Image: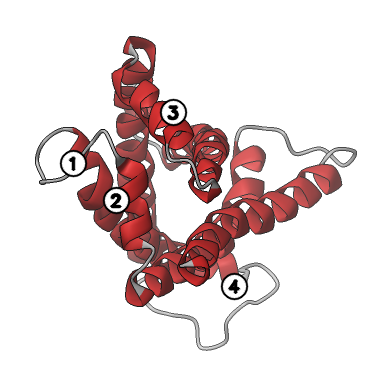
Amino acid sequence: MRKYFGSSITKKLVVSLAGVFLIVFLLVHLAINLFLLKSDPSTFNSAAHFMGNNVVVKIFEVILLLLFALHIVGAVVLQIQNWRARPVRYKVANHSQTSFFSKYMIYLGGVVFVFLVVHFINFYFVKIGLVQGDPDNFYAMAHGLFGLPLYVAIYVFSFLVLSFHLHHAFQSAFQTIGLNHQKYTPAVKLAGLAYSILVPAGFAVIPVVIYFSK
């Protein structure tokens, strides 16, 4: 049993299942963030207040943080195992078996992780009182940050990287959990492509619109 749970197959399954949950979470997060485009801050602040104080949401928040940790740690462990299994790089890369996204997945994920740390400091740490700020007016805090050209550039770049990360992760996750069928795989690939473009673009558009509307 211990050997089974320590296998690379199990690690891939855990990383994939955590990734699927995070994919769903991004849709909810985007739906709330779109309220930042409204001139009235009450809608976004009310949604943020509900997400920060509802008991059920708080439980899912803990689950979400655990899934983030599982996804990140699992991905890093798998990558290290892959590097150790092939310590000597091939003289000629096998492009037919290793796609660009698969090859650089760990690095793309690293960029996303750095952005998450910055994002947590700016918002989540404010909510739990570790960083000074007004947790009752995240609308003003977001608009203030999106008025800074450097922050907007970092935000947009991070979601561009996330788009590439999701493009591979979406298909890989569904393949790992066994939803790989000749009939359904093309639809999964199309859905993954659409998701990896539209969702990150939705996030990236928000700060750009806010910045140029000031």
**First reached walking from the N terminus: tag 2 or tag 3:** 3
- Quickly name the residue at label 4: 100
**First reached walking from the N terminus: tag 1 or tag 2:** 1
Amino acid bearing label 4 = Phe
55 horizontally vs 14: left or right? left
Report the residue at 54% width, 33% height from top.
28
How far apart are labels 3 and 1 at the CA level?
16 Å
How far apart are labels 2 and 3 at the CA level?
15 Å
Q: Are marks 4 and 1 in contact (CB under 8 Å)?
A: no
Amino acid bearing label 1 = Val
Amino acid bearing label 3 = Ala
Q: Are marks 4 and 3 in contact (CB under 8 Å)?
A: no
10 horizontally vs 59: left or right? right
Q: Are marks 1 and 2 in contact (CB under 8 Å)?
A: yes
Report the residue at 37% width, 76% height from top.
149
Observer-nearest of 100 and 214: 214
**First reached walking from the N terminus: tag 4 or tag 1:** 4
Q: Secondary structure at mark 3?
A: helix
- Quickly name the residue at label 1: 126
What is the quadrant of the C terminus in the image?
bottom left
- Quickly name the residue at label 3: 47
- Quickly name the residue at label 2: 141
